[in-house]
Amino acid sequence: MKADSDHGRTRDERSIGELIGDVTGDLALLFRQEVELAKAEMKQEVGAAGRAAALFGAATLAGLLAAALLSAALVFGLAGVVPPGWAALIVAVLWAVVGYVLYAGGRARLARRRR
């Protein structure tokens, strides 16, 4: 039999109330440790998600810059054939059509998800 250092009695001689108290204390400690572990894991996941979001943001910015420069190049290219004002209008209409097609596709996909 092991001696219980808290009460000077063997474990077999402890009351049920003391044993339940020990179990309750152990469960509370386990719960606190699990909560701390979950917090640490969440912090790590949030950090990784933040870094990924920053990369997506940078990729979006690079894509927008590329689209703007390609649009300007298209305007200058068309300006050799038609007046510059018309060239800019043609490119703007082209972008409006692309925007509408993307909008309609997204709207249709959203409508299918709602059904």
Image: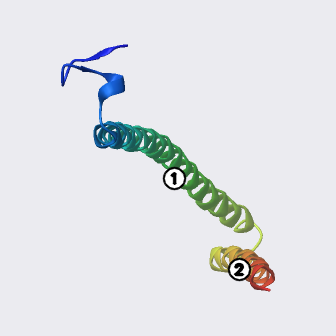
Residue 103's mark? 2
Left or right: 61 as drawn, with respect to 96: left
Report x, y in % for residue 114: 74, 84
Q: For this rendering, which residue is in front, 42 or 21? A: 21
Kindly report the distance in space between the C-alpha atoms of the residues bearing marks 2 and 1: 21 Å
Left or right: 56 as drawn, with respect to 103: left
Question: Which structural element holds mark 2?
Answer: helix
Vertical comparison of 29 with 65: above or below: above
Left or right: 17 as drawn, with respect to 77: left
Report x, y in % for residue 45: 48, 42
Q: Which image quadrant is residue 5 in?
A: top left
Question: For mark 2, does the 10 Å Cα neighbourhood hold few (<14), some (14 to 19), or many (20 or more) residues?
Answer: few
Amino acid found under the numbered disc labelled 1: Gly
Amino acid found under the numbered disc labelled 2: Tyr
Q: Residue at x 56, y 50 (%)?
A: 56
Report x, y in % for residue 1: 37, 13
Q: Work out which quarter of the rendered image holds the C terminus and state it.
A: bottom right
Going by the picture, which residue comes out furthest to the front? 13
Residue 22's mark? none
Q: For this rendering, which residue is in front, 94 or 78? A: 94
Question: Which structural element holds mark 1?
Answer: helix
Vertical comparison of 115 with 14: above or below: below
Q: Residue at x 73, y 77 (%)?
A: 106
Question: What residue does disc 1 label?
Answer: 57
Q: For this rendering, which residue is in front, 107 or 84? A: 107
Q: Residue at x 64, y 59 (%)?
A: 67
Q: Residue at x 18, y 25 (%)?
A: 7
